[in-house]
Amino acid sequence: MSRPTVRSLGRRLSWWLALQTLIGLGTVCAAVYAVAAMSLSNRQAESLTQKQALIRHVLAEAEADRDLGELKHRLDDFLLGHEDLTLTLQAGADVPLYRSSTVESALAKRVSTFEVPFAWQGARSIRATLTLDARSDAQLLQRLAITLVGAAAVGAALVSFGGFRLVRRGLAPVRDLVEQTRHLAADSLRQRLDGSRQPEELQPLVEQFNALLQRLNQAYEQLEGFNADVAHELCTPLTTLISATELALRKTRGVEEMREVLGSNLEELRRLAGIVHDMLFLSHADRGATARREPTASLASLAATVVEYHEAAFEEASLKVEIVGDAACEVDVALVRRALSNLVGNATRYATPASAVRIEISEIGAGQMRIAVVNQGQAIASEQIPRLFDRFYRGDSARRDADAHHGLGLAIVAAIARMHGGRPVAQSEGGITSIGMTLVAERCTPTTRPCTP
């Protein structure tokens, strides 16, 4: 299906301006012509009425004298100087009494016929026909029409030309924006459109476009950083696998030794598979995936199962666990369990040995829950907190087991929070670190029932 062709905005504005100008001037000229024609018609009617009264007066005087010659003489005197008038008198139906010079051949004329009481040779009245030659008025109207049409055409042409120039000048800022955008490329997303010379109407467009450039630049930088992080994370295990395999192939080895090499390689391969699976999950979340909703009677019970899964790590670090709060909600149980596992695992690694880890479940608003894991330990610098949920981010490489994990755990927590309509939360102050997430939980019923694993 072909797309409709959209013509140039400048040409369309120019043509519309020319058409409106022509219609406006044509309407004015038509009104002037109509008023002039009406005025001339009224003047002709008024002139015939005046002449009709004078002829009645002359005929009334002639009826008393009974002198036809005197009547013709008076009528000749009356019509003297009125070459545009023709008078015809008839007694009865067919008896002509008087006829002046004729203008009956004129195409433009106005005729007035009237009866005048006049006793003459058995007739009781005279029929008078007064004809006014209107050729001069018709010629005047013709000249006026030609003048008005010419004035309208020339005026429309002049206004159209001026409108075209004004439209072209008015669209100059748009052409300037087009020229600025032509110089933008993937390596110049830091540049912004210069709106200082743009009119007020284009300022919102410039602001929105610059905001879009800002978002594109951030996304591009994140993509570049993500690619670098992925390459870095995959490079180390791949190098280890290649080196171990090359060493194993250099000489003949026993079964047990080869089993040990293969076991080491399998561990690295599982680590690679874990990174790939986590990246696929984050990619799925970035494409706008939402969480499935299923009822769970107790978030505290769900947290207890996670604690049970990490029980060995808790015992190894001599940590105590406490679950505070509970709620019955509709959430994606598998995703929430995964997020809790990441949070608990993170707290277990960085908690002070023999301290307490607390899992807090609380309502923070209508239909909104907060799940956080609180631990005691080394505080996180305030400038690192906003980046805790970035992919492959490790806040302090000196912290314990910093190299043993690929830095996607908290990024997955943030993705699960967004899939539930929430957001990640973190704070660290005075040796107490709380990291968690908020959830928009449907049909949520918070409780205060404590739950101990």
Image (tube, grey):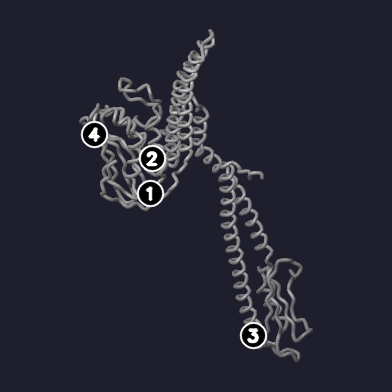
Foreground tag (3 vs 2): 2
- Most distant residue in the bottom direction: 122
Helix, strand, or loop for circle 3? helix
Residue placed under numbered mark 1 in the picture: 296
Residue placed under numbered mark 3 in the picture: 60
Foreground tag (4 vs 3): 4
Say what amino acid the circle numbered 3 marks.
Ala
Q: Position of residue 265 (x, y in %)?
A: 48, 19
CA–CA distance in space, label 2 to label 4: 20 Å
CA–CA distance in space, label 1 to label 3: 120 Å
Q: Quadrant of the C terminus?
A: top left
Q: Quadrant of the N terminus?
A: top right
Closer-to-camera residue (271/362): 271
Residue placed under numbered mark 2 in the picture: 337
Say what amino acid the circle numbered 1 marks.
Thr
Tell which circle, 2 or 4, labels the residue nearer the N-terminal end: 2
Helix, strand, or loop for circle 4? strand
Tell which circle, 3 or 2, labels the residue nearer the N-terminal end: 3
Label at residue 362: none
CA–CA distance in space, label 2 to label 1: 11 Å
Relative height, residue 201 to residue 347 (above, below): below
Q: Is residue 278 left or right of residue 10?
A: left
